[in-house]
Image (spheres, rainbow, N blue to C red):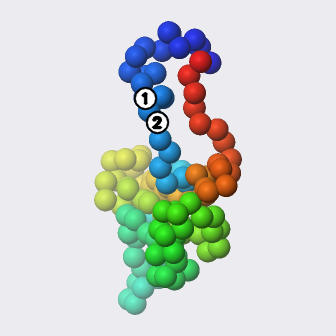
């Protein structure tokens, strides 16, 4: 990485004060159709979907995250298709789909992967 003095004070301050939040693995796709879920009488294409094994899993996920526990059973998944609400975010007839999966990182035993950014 370039020496600290080449970055400017705002950038250096941002790196020095950065704190991880909820860790996730995100993937973005370009598609010709939005996600479609079967419902009574047809299909539904929401802007935002949450895939959970059960409602209880959402509560457990929040609790595990708060105490720094690793629980990779039945991980929650977000599916976001902003082009359902705003088609101008993609070329005509296309959609963007973002898939977000949560992964443990800041756990009691120490970080599971990666390292914290540090300026030289």
Q: Position of residue 79 (x, y in %)?
A: 48, 63
Label 2 secondary element:
loop
| Quadrant for the C terminus in the image | top right
**Count of number-bearing discs:** 2
For this view, does 111 lie left or right of residue 44?
A: right
Label 1 secondary element:
helix
Vertical placement of residue 49 versus 32, above or below: below
Vertical placement of residue 50 versus 8, above or below: below
Tag shown at residue 14: 1
Q: Can residue 35 be seen in this view?
A: no
Residue at 52%, 63% in the rendered image = 67
| Quadrant for the N terminus in the image | top right
Crowding around mark 2 (Cα neighbors within 10 Å: few <14, some 14 to 19, many 20+) is: few
Q: Position of residue 22 (x, y in %)?
A: 49, 54
Residue at 59%, 14% in the rendered image = 2
Q: Where is residue 81 in the image (x, y as percent from the top left)?
A: 42, 59
Q: Pointer 1 and pointer 2: residues touching (CB < 8 Å)?
A: yes
Residue at 51%, 75% in the rendered image = 60
Q: How far apart are marks 1 and 2 (CA)?
A: 6 Å
Crowding around mark 1 (Cα neighbors within 10 Å: few <14, some 14 to 19, many 20+) is: few
Residue at 48%, 62% in the rendered image = 66
For this view, does 118 lie left or right of residue 88?
A: right
Residue holding disc 2: 18
Considering every residue shown, the one lying at the far bottom of the view is: 40
Q: Where is residue 93 in the image (x, y as percent from the top left)?
A: 42, 54
Tag shown at residue 108: none
Considering every residue shown, the one lying at the far top of the view is: 5
Vertical placement of residue 9 versus 33, above or below: above
């Amino acid at each position: 990485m370039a020496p600290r003095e080449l970055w400017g004070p705002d950038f250096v301050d941002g790196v020095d004060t950065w704190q991880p939040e909820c860790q996730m693995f995100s993937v973005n796709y370009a598609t010709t159709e939005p996600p479609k879920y079967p419902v009574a009488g047809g299909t539904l294409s929401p802007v935002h979907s949450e895939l959970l094994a059960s409602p209880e899993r959402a509560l457990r996920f929040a609790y595990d995250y708060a105490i720094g526990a690793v629980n990779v059973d039945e991980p929650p998944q977000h599916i976001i298709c902003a082009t359902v609400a705003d088609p101008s975010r993609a070329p005509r007839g296309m959609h963007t789909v973002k898939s977000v999966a949560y992964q443990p990182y800041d756990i009691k035993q120490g970080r599971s992967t990666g390292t914290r950014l540090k300026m030289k």
